[in-house]
Image: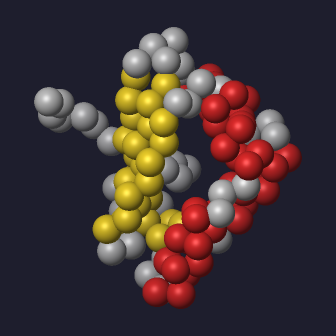
């Protein structure tokens, strides 16, 4: 099993943050099904202030750069992504064109 962690910021607006949280209380079923269909077995998003941390688990043969674009082929996944991008902005250290920034694992128990 592989695990991944990524980070992004929400826009600095309490109403935007609350809307984002509300959307995630009611994620579209097609989005959940699409993520599972590419092998993601677990996904959690944590919020601290306006910073998000996304944690996900997938099988050992999962390749984020190969498999995630297959998820994005779905019109519903594209619509969800467009909707979520209204609330998000890259972190200061994001690379050129990077949206969710990958994080380095530095410890495991």
Whole-percent x and y of residue 89? 51, 66
88 sits to left or right of 31: left
Q: Residue at x 52, y 30 (%)?
A: 41
Viewer can see residue 77: no
Whole-percent x and y of residue 8? 44, 58
Q: Residue at x 63, y 68 (%)?
A: 23
Q: Residue furthest top?
A: 61
21 sits to left or right of 45: right
4 sits to left or right of 19: left
Viewer can see residue 82: yes
Q: Residue at x 78, y 56 (%)?
A: 79
Is residue 83 shown above or below 34? Answer: below
| Quadrant of the frame with the C terminus | top left
Picture colour scheme: secondary structure
Task: Please tell me which residue lies in front, 26 or 86.
Answer: 26
Quarter of the image holding residue 73? top right
Is residue 16 shown above or below 36? Answer: below
Q: Residue at x 65, y 63 (%)?
A: 26
Whole-percent x and y of residue 20? 56, 71
Quarter of the image holding residue 68? top right
Task: Please tell me which residue lies in front, 66 or 44.
Answer: 44
């Amino acid at each position: 099993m592989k695990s991944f962690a990524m980070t992004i910021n929400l826009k600095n607006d309490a109403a935007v943050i609350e809307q984002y949280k509300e959307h995630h209380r009611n994620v579209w079923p097609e989005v959940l099904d699409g993520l599972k269909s590419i092998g993601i077995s677990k996904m959690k998003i944590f919020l601290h202030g306006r910073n998000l941390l996304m944690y996900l688990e997938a099988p050992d043969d999962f390749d984020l750069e190969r498999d995630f674009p297959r998820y994005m082929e779905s019109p519903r996944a594209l619509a969800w992504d467009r909707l979520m991008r209204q609330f998000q902005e890259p972190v200061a250290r994001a690379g050129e064109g990077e949206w969710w920034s990958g994080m380095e694992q530095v410890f495991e128990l």
